[in-house]
Image (spheres, rainbow, N blue to C red):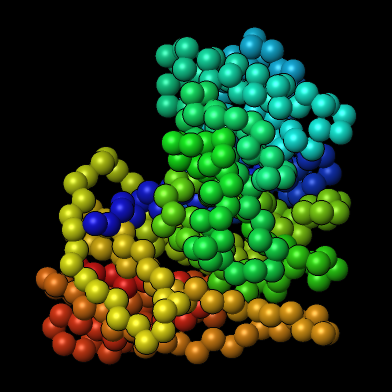
Amino acid sequence: MPQPADSFADAVGVNTHFGYQGSSYITAWPKVSSALLKSGFRHIRDGAPSQDSTYIERLRYLGEHGIKHSVGFEVGDTPSVIRGTLGDFRPYVDAVEPNNEYDEAARKDPDWVQHVTSEQRTLYAIVHGQRDFDGITVLGPSLAHTALFAQLGDLDAYEDAGNVHSYICRRDPQSTQVARTLAIAHASTRLKPIWTTETGYGDDPKRNCWLPDDVIAKYDPRVVAEDFNAGQPRVYFYQFVDTPGDPGFGATGLLKANGEAKPQYTALVSLISLLSDPGPIFELKALRYAVESPVPDVDHLLLEKRGGIYELLLWQEVGSYRDTPTGGARIPIAPVSVNISIIGAHGIKYYTYDSTWSFISATIDQGTADSVRLPVTDSISVLEIH
């Protein structure tokens, strides 16, 4: 059985900082907002609106253009503040969460668990106690140190979804890594789905955790595919624009500080554009197919659009970069010839990334009427089946 293609397109979000004074989020607002609206991203994750009227108006502007906001509140925010904020921004808020990575306050606040779980209960009671807030997802607490999830206890009764941050430094996205992260987060989220609200890679060579942009462009779409395959409804990249003043995460943007798009931005936007299929829920239909690969590292994900169109995502789950004594080097990955057997296909197209990280239709070996042979690389490619 496939999953809806538009659910995949809807799964991609991005962290923003439209309250960062002096950053490109403010100084280059026209260019940044234009890139965000053109991206196809439907979700941002930012702070709770402050008294900064410009900040509030910009978030409202994005909401009016279809980009919804996940709001993070802070320990100490009163119920009246929470209700007022949600009231001001409804219907542009689609999720709320308690204090971001509040476990970092453990050295100053020995009762951090009690305080953040109390905030969790308050958020849940407010959102689910008022009809005006129907449709808002209440996320659980995010933690900087995932080993501490067990200290939170079982929060299923006070959250709609769990909340995890997953930074894997220079490593490639792997299903085994996703499974390990989810297993840790399930210490406090036993039954509910889990969202990844921060993930991504940096491209600053002065930092230990960095990768070249062309490698990140391969990895970022695979991050979404691996997480989606594992049942995660939402994945937020950190972050949309570089903020050079931030010593830790300043080079993790999908855009450079001047608003110029990086390859990873284009790669994600191209994939979202190909898979976007908004509209009402429709009945999914099974597709009989088989993937035959000479190596075990080929992953795949089946999606369906309206009108009986299937999108089969394929990629090699391998590393594209390795550490060396002098720093690091790209790993040339040879394409693997994969045979796809399909029952009942009337037509096919094959899409691969070009040198600009946009999808183009590729020439393939048509094979027989019910099978096709494809070259699969370490970048996602898409077989469209009619």
Left/right placement of residue 168 relative to residue 312 reads: right
Q: How many marks?
A: 0
Q: 153 or 226, which is in the foreground? A: 153
Asked whether residue 89 is in view, the answer is yes
Q: Position of residue 314 (x, y in %)?
A: 39, 72
Q: Position of residue 28 (x, y in %)?
A: 73, 49
Q: 14 or 66, which is in the foreground? A: 14
Q: At x 81% / y 71%, what residue is drawn?
A: 205
Give the vertical position of 130 relative to 197 (above or below): above
Give the vertical position of 254 relative to 96 (above or below): below
Left/right placement of residue 27 relative to residue 213 reads: right
Left/right placement of residue 369 relative to residue 339 reads: left
Instruction: State the image quarter where residue 346 is shown.
Output: bottom left
Instruction: State the image quarter where residue 114 is shown.
Output: top right
Instruction: State the image quarter where residue 286 is shown.
Output: bottom left
Q: Position of residue 243 (x, y in %)?
A: 79, 52
Q: At x 35% / y 83%, what residue is drawn?
A: 293
Q: At x 45% / y 87%, what residue is drawn?
A: 335
Q: Position of residue 320 (x, y in %)?
A: 60, 79
Give the vertical position of 195 relative to 93 (above or below): below
Check the picture and name the quadrant holding the C terminus.
bottom left
Asked whether residue 37 is in view, the answer is no
Check the picture and name the quadrant holding the N terminus.
bottom left
Q: At x 64% / y 10%, what residue is drawn?
A: 80
Give the vertical position of 245 relative to 353 (above or below): above
